[in-house]
Amino acid sequence: MSEMSELIIESTSKVFAAYSTKEVVNEAEKGIWANELWNKLAQYGIVTVAVPEELGGSGGDYEDALSIVRLASRFSAPVPLAETFIANWLLAEHGVAVTNEVLTIATETDGQPFKFYQEGNGWIVTGRAKNVPWGRFAKKLVVLGEASEGGALSVLNLEKAEIIQGNNIAGEARDQVVFNQVFIPECTIIPVDKIKYEERILYSCALTKSVMMAGALDNILEIAINYSKERSQFGRPIHRFQAIQHHLALLAGEAAAAGIAASYAIHSFQKNPVSKEIALAKLRINEAAGKAAPIAHQVLAAIGFTYEHILHHNTRRLWAWRDEFGKESDWEKVITKQLQKLEKNELWPLITGVKNNQKKVETR
Amino acid sequence: MKALQIPVVELPRETENLRREIRLFIQQKIDSGLIEPKCDSWLSGYSAEFSKDMGRRGWIGMTWPKKYGGGERPSIERYVVTEEMLAAGAPVAGHWIADRQTGPLLLKYGTEKQKHFFLPRIAKGECFFAIGLSEPNAGSDLANIQTRAMKVDKGWILNGSKTWTSGAHFSHYSIVLCRTSPQDPDNRHSGMSQLILDLKAPGVTIRPIHLMTGEHHFNEIFFDDVFVPDDLAVGEIGNGWAQGMAELAYERSGPERILSTYPLLNELTNILIEQGNTESLNKVSRLISRLWTLRNMSLGIAQLLEEGVPSNMIASLVKDMGTKFEQEIPEITRLLVSVTPSVNSESLIEKYLAQSILQSPGFTLRGGTSEILRGIIAKGVIQQ
Ligand SMILES: Cc1cc2nc3c(=O)[nH]c(=O)nc-3n(C[C@H](O)[C@H](O)[C@H](O)COP(=O)(O)OP(=O)(O)OC[C@H]3O[C@@H](n4cnc5c(N)ncnc54)[C@H](O)[C@@H]3O)c2cc1C
């Protein structure tokens, strides 16, 4: 993390506390855009962290940005911060200057890849993207597709797109975005290797989601601990019951595991944006979500089952997010592919990152 | 939560050669039939020869000062040695306790004389220690120990008994926790001291307690007016509890709380890759994501401990989760391959599976039961 990070985290915390309140999160679920929150984030230069200043960014590194993402998820911030980060990073990498606009990114195109045809000073775009995070609120969509010369990364103005609204189980906007022969003037189309970029975008999204889940897990642990101190039954706070202590210990374990997995994934991302650490982290953190959410609900009992209490902001998100950008079963397959390349007794070298001696491997 | 934050550790490049050296060393021992890898080798794999050999290579007491026979190596190198040994199932039980616990204890609290006498011998792999804590009526409730030492001229007279003492039958000494003043109901942890006990001293009787498999692993030790000279008391008289507890974080978060059944996981992976069994390999991939996470936690805590950050709570977390993981490996393995566990089998996987199943109840007991650990973790997070 860079030096500015402590400061950023502190001031960003304040922004989230003030503008990503329970009411804002609830309203977002009803379809109201958290305008003030985004404007504040933009005003403080938060949405362009890890983009160099020459390109209109705020500087800092990925670790800074991802610490902010982690924080945002603790507040269930109903804005596409992670998506905007990823989009901005991809654009900056290609020398495109970034702004504070709300961006989103598409990873599922439902077997109908986006097609771009150049015409005059613009492009004609056709395509359908599914489950686009916050699609209805975004100004632009970053999506991969095909131009006449091959794969292309595009930044599409969403003004003329058809949006079919949808939600995940946390009530977060996950929309269909449809372009049917839409002409977009002065639209950014960057030639790229599509297969490679598909992988990159998926891994980036899996990384940010993992980090968000780690943040949410941290928060449900805190909620459960605090509640166990406040709530009394049988004349004592419930944390005095050993059964509750065991719940808290297991919950702490899952939160800690998710935290370290996310940290390693972040660490690896700087060097390799499609690292196996990201795959391992999403796999482990998905598992943590499934184990931890029920524990938190058990500790809070009926009150945590209500709309009134905020526990569900985090737990419903955990249940939604574990299915986004790869379930356990999807990432297992990715790891399995790596296993299949191993020679005998090479699992340990895979885990430690240090190959065996060339010379000799045991024969059966 | 701050207390749960664990740093990312980047292993230095130099450790890569160390790893290769260790792997080659073990491979040669296996090839020449000198050792037989097994699961849970840090508790049940004993070879005096192998320990000596490790000592010769400087792989015991690696971090200790050179003047005491150590290697003054960074603690991360010790970590590498221990995890490589465990992953390979090498017989490290002989020196394990002395290297992990006794050495650091003496370095911190021992007299110069004790350090000069014991540490070089431990580092050579020639001097083994056993842990003398548990008693018939003091298991989880360790503060309830009754073994007592009475002050006499020039030393102490020890009476009582210890139980579940791993490896007492091949160890040379044991650190015995005993009462040096009567039990104080208002301060249960006071009045205890640590004595270095020569297991061959007159009045010491060691009796085997056979495991359910029939193996001789742990023991009962009886003390009948055993004389322990003054210069074998460790640290301060009356401070035994605090001295003993200080090392618990090392004991609880090491790779031995994650890797006890690793040889089985390796063999399972070998077989499934050979079979091209993708379905089942997916289950292995899941296990690997857990192992990767646990190892990273363990490494991070090793670094925190090196920096002097108190980590008892997260170390307990690693032990609770890590030992559960160790137990899971055989449970998952048996459903993925059609083999019959047997300790006598010619097939590695059948043998490792049998060892893992039969040793697994101990994983979540030794070094503090999971129930006790969860109590520590919960109290730790509640205090935050
Ligand atoms: C393989 C192995 C090797 C060992 N090696 C050594 C050794 O070398 N030296 C040594 O001194 N000891 C050794 N031990 C002993 C070990 O430390 C004890 O087994 C352990 O501390 C538990 O004590 P106990 O067996 O008496 O169980 P008990 O303490 O009697 O526990 C019985 C059950 O009650 C539970 N329980 C107890 N108290 C509480 C509580 N407050 N809250 C909730 N649940 C509770 C326990 O978790 C357990 O499930 C070894 C044990 C094993 C299995």
Image (cartoon, coloured by chain):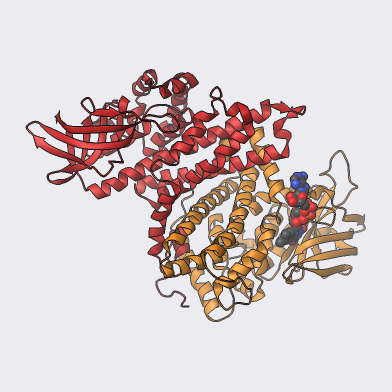
Residue B72 or residue B10, whichever sits in front: B10
Work out whether B119 lies above or below A216: below
User: Which residue in the rendered view is the most extreme toward the left?
Assistant: A120
- At x 49%, y 49%, the residue is B9
Work out whether A60 lies above or below A41: below
Residue B27 or residue B303, whichever sits in front: B27
> Looking at the image, in which quadrant does ligand 1 appear?
bottom right
Query: Where is residue A288 drawn, in percent x and y?
Result: 52, 43
Please tell me how many numbered marks the rendered image carries.
Answer: 0
Query: Where is residue B265 drawn, in percent x and y?
Result: 53, 63
Query: Where is residue A8 drawn, in percent x and y?
Result: 42, 28
- At x 53%, y 69%, the residue is B338
Query: Where is residue A33 drawn, in percent x and y?
Result: 37, 21
Q: Where's the N terminus of chain B, which quadrant?
A: top right
Q: Where is residue B311, by image quadrant? A: top right
Q: Where's the C terminus of chain B, which quadrant?
A: top right
Q: Which color is chain A depicted in?
A: red
Q: Which color is chain B depicted in?
A: orange
